Image (spheres, coloured by chain):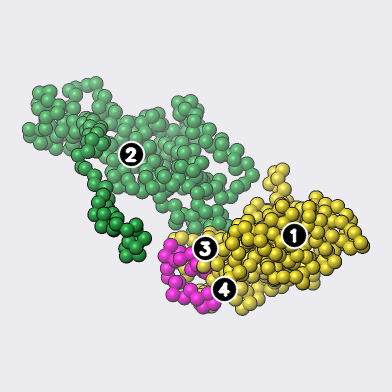
Amino acid sequence: MTRMENPSVSIRDLSLNFGAISVLETLNIDVAEGEFIVLLGPSGCGKSTLLNCIAGLLDVSDGRIFIKGKNVTWEEPKDRGIGMVFQSYALYPQMTVEKNLSFGLRVAGIAKDEIAKRIARAAEILQIEPLLQRKPSALSGGQRQRVAIGRALVRDVDVFLFDEPLSNLDAKLRAELRVEIKLLHSKLQNTMIYVTHDQIEAMTLADRIAVMKGGVIQQLDAPQTIYNRPVNRFVAGFLGSPAMNFLDGRLEKDDGSWHFVAEDVRIPLATYAFEKEPVPGAAVFGIRPEHVAFNSGAGWPFTAMSNVVVVEPMGSDTLVWLKLANQNFTVRVTSERTPNNADAVSIGFDPMRASLFDATTGTRL
Amino acid sequence: MADHAVSLPAGTGSIGLEASGPRGPKPRHVFSRRNIFLYGTLIVVALYYLLPLYVMVVTSLKGMPEIRLGNIFSPPLEITFEPWVKAWSSACTGLNCDGLSRGFWNSVRITVPSVILSIAIASVNGYALANWRFKGADTFFVILIVGAFIPYQVMIYPIVIILREVGLYGSLSGLVIVHSIFGMPILTLLFRNYFSSMPEELFRAARVDGAGFWGIYFRIMLPMSLPIFVVAIILQVTGIWNDFLFGVVYTRPDTYPMTVQLNNIVNSVQGVKEYNVNMAATILTGLVPLVVYFVSGKLFVRGIAAGAVKG
């Protein structure tokens, strides 16, 4: 992993075990100043644990954590220059919004007029001025989460940590607050580390996404790179909804050019950019449903005919399930072109947009 | 309705469906068999439990001649408060003839500090065990809980010696310490479970905000734990007020709590048995826990439900 100049947060060889169970394994990551990093992964992948380690709420088993160049591995959470927003908001129920916001400042013994000034600023940024005298129980979920963000905001921290902040909200509010968090980031330009299992949040918010599995970062890259060139089959399958199509088959070389073969299907790979010189053998071919053209005639490096099995209308577009080489295969089509069940249709795609994986290790070929 | 009517087959019409069959809530009969059985049982059981109390109250309001008639269920012909006054202020126990009032104030002086001390310590214990998982916390907790299962009788004599050695035997403060120690296991368990049921993120948020052990305890946890404090207070007030064994073992006659004094009044072998005074004295002694239950009934149930269920 390349080391960056003056990272805002850097984690070196971080490990964490609970007894014999290893949750994080020699993990390294550098977060640039003002960067928005999303830690993405299924539940139990260690992403929240990593965030709690950065916050200082969990003791690490090994390794170091630096924030703003300072080694904070043994520091208390309050001394790390971090603010944290929790999934359950974690507002103090007996205090008004104003007292919730000022709690950390009062504990730190900051002067009253300074507290008032910071609360006014945070309340203005988050538009919660009318709510200041209310108790958390009198707020909606979205308002509560704003207050929770405000609590991090007033403390003037270097790094914001978000632990699945939108997971308790309904879909509509989630979309709204997602945009607000993005606006907040562009306004404040703070470093933000954001944990989620929601790939849409990850794709929309992140400067870079770290996809995690089993306590290991699988891929750390810009969202588009992760989406288009996943480093392994796990990343490919985890991102994207509807999920990427995977076909099991073999890589073969004939007439000097590579082909992917599965039963009667032969996909020419002339346009595919291999990571390294391929070898013949078992492989998995992956292509996203939206990268497959539907009933659009010839002109594609690969075309095939198939019968529609199931049609799933999703409003804006429709997912069509087919069989290709006797394996499930989905195509995303605009809703105006929805076919009927059992219709014979033609599909085509350019393998340039596909991903090939090793059948056993799952790494990208 | 019009849209739906269109889809009905010709001839049926929509009137047939609308006019027939039950509609709205199902009617319930007050005197159904189920209700009679249910309320009948409840009333019988309630009467069964209230009967002794009724006898006590009625007897305490009668004069001795009337009691000798032997009609214990009949209401008093002539109501007198004489037995109550006597029980409170002039009934004799041994050489003292100043009634239960002495024992009452002794009990107050025992109960109040014991309750405050035991709850103060146990709540901090529970908080530390629930939120600050220190090394050996589980072992400590197990030892504490095991303490709750050791019979009191085993510990009575060793404690007598310990109190004697530190010079507290026979004093009220000695008894206060004993009560506080014996309240510890169950109260700690109660508080630990209550604090464990609070969202952990709240505790984490407070730590990020910079609050320490006591800061979080006093500013975050305490204001949220009124129900469990009420439960603890009720358990302790009634438990300590009703205690007889420790009172009789660890105090002297002039520091006897009310329960011990009551026993001495009721069980005195000399002179005439004054049943009316005994009844009045018993009710007086039981008044404090009774009042506590009546005043805090709702909070008690809420707290028990919040604190005790989760292990």
Q: Which badge, 1 or 4, comes first in the chain's sequence?
A: 4
Q: Residue furthest left?
A: B77
Residue nearer the viewer, B127 or A218: A218
Task: Provide the residue designation for mark 1.
Answer: A286
Marks 4 and 2 sit apart, C-alpha to C-alpha, by 64 Å
Residue range (magenta):
A124-147
Q: Amino acid at mark 4?
A: Glu
Q: Is residue A304 magenta?
A: no
Q: Are discs 4 and 2 less than 8 Å apart at CB?
A: no
Question: Are tags 2 and 3 found on a single chain?
Answer: no
| Residue A27 placement (x, y as % from top left) | 76, 57
Q: Residue furthest front?
A: B10
**Secondary structure at numbered mark 4:** helix
Chain rendered green: B
Q: Which mark is residue A180?
A: 4
**Tag 1, which chain?**
A
Q: Which badge, 4 or 3, comes first in the chain's sequence?
A: 3
Residue nearer the viewer, A144 or B260: A144
Tell me, yes or no, if residue B254 can be seen here: no
Q: Amino acid at mark 2?
A: Asn
| Residue A240 placement (x, y as % from top left) | 67, 63
Task: Provide the residue designation for mark 3.
Answer: A169
**Secondary structure at numbered mark 2:** helix
Marks 4 and 3 sit apart, C-alpha to C-alpha, by 14 Å
Q: Amino acid at mark 1?
A: Gly
Chain rendered yellow: A
**Secondary structure at numbered mark 1:** strand
User: Please, is residue A215 above or below residue A257 in the view?
Assistant: above
Q: Identify the residue at image location x=61%, y=73%.
A: A182
Q: Amino acid at mark 3?
A: Leu
Q: Which mark is residue B106?
A: 2
